[in-house]
Image (spheres, rainbow, N blue to C red):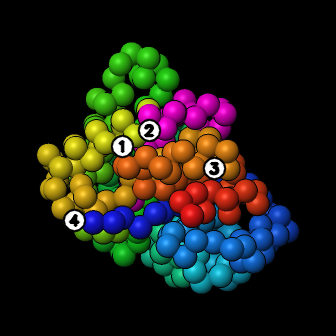
């Protein structure tokens, strides 16, 4: 079955109303491939702003959320609040959440379950660090991360799996198309064995890690690369080029 190409833009902790407003105007006015699902991850304080300004053909994602609906959790936001802003996606388990803020696999699994129960789509991120790749344990690491996510998913139609080798995020190093394809193919095999063949065939596995206008076309041509999660380049006009990588 054909998987709809998915391109997420993770704005991270960047932008203000002026610069994001300009970016949104560029996106709204750009010529984008209608066969691609596009979702922009805005800082939580700008979710309302992004959703009200972005054309309806683009989705919006929160960059994180908590594992319960409400309560004494200062500084956190819940899936219910995200939905209340008209936003339908959340990014969970990003390597910066794991490695800068110390979020555990277990917590990311709990967040995934709660977000899905509340009707959000989840862009679930996994990926190995440089020492793990050099130590030859890439598969072990990403399978363990994927298992915790899979244990918390009932409906896979609302999940996009984002493979982001940590050593390639914001470093200018990109996994070669062959390296990306190799891990994506192994992840799909893992899903086939541990979840089901139907899920393995239908779930979108996207690549993240220094994706640019220059690297996107060859990456997009790999058979198990179903899109991208784009960091820095998603704040620039070249994001349109990346959305159109298959066009």
Task: Give the Cα distance between marks 2 and 3.
Answer: 17 Å
Q: Is residue 51 above or below residue 106?
A: below
Report the quarter where the C terminus lies: bottom right
Task: Give the Cα distance between marks 1 and 3.
Answer: 19 Å
* SS state under label 4: loop
> Do residues under tags 1 and 2 come within 8 Å of each other at their CB atoms?
yes
Report the quarter where the N terminus lies: bottom left
Q: Is residue 148 above or below residue 238?
A: above
Going by the image, does 108 lie left or right of 172? left
Marks 1 and 3, the one that precedes in the sequence: 1
Which of pointers 2 and 3 indicates the residue nearer the eye?
Answer: 2
Marks 2 and 3, the one that precedes in the sequence: 2
Residue under label 1:
184
Residue shown at 35%/19% (left/top)?
136
Task: Give the Cα distance between marks 1 and 2.
Answer: 6 Å
Which of pointers 2 and 4 indicates the residue nearer the eye?
Answer: 2
Residue under label 3:
231
Residue shown at 67%/59% (left/top)?
241
Can residue 159 be seen? no
């Amino acid at each position: 079955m054909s998987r709809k190409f998915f391109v997420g833009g993770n704005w991270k902790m960047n932008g203000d109303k002026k610069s994001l407003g300009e970016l949104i105007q560029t996106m709204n006015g750009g010529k984008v491939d209608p066969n691609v699902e596009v979702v922009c991850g805005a800082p939580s304080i700008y979710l309302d702003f992004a959703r009200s300004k972005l054309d309806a053909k683009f989705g919006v994602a929160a960059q994180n959320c908590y594992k319960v609906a409400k309560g004494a959790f200062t500084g956190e936001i819940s899936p219910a609040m995200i939905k209340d802003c008209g936003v339908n996606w959340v990014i969970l388990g990003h390597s910066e959440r794991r490695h800068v803020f110390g979020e555990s696999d277990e917590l990311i699994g709990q967040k995934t379950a709660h977000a899905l129960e509340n009707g959000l789509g989840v862009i679930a991120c996994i990926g190995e660090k440089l020492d793990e790749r050099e130590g030859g344990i890439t598969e072990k690491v990403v399978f363990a991360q994927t298992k915790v996510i899979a244990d918390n998913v009932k409906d896979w139609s609302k999940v996009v799996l984002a493979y982001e080798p940590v050593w390639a995020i914001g470093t200018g190093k990109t996994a070669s198309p062959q390296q990306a394809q190799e891990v994506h193919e192994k992840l799909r095999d893992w899903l086939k064995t541990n979840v089901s063949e139907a899920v393995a065939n239908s779930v979108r596995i996207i690549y993240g890690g220094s994706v640019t206008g220059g690297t996107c076309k060859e990456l997009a041509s790999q058979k198990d690369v179903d899109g991208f999660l784009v960091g820095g380049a998603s704040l620039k006009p070249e994001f349109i080029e990346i959305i159109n990588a298959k066009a």
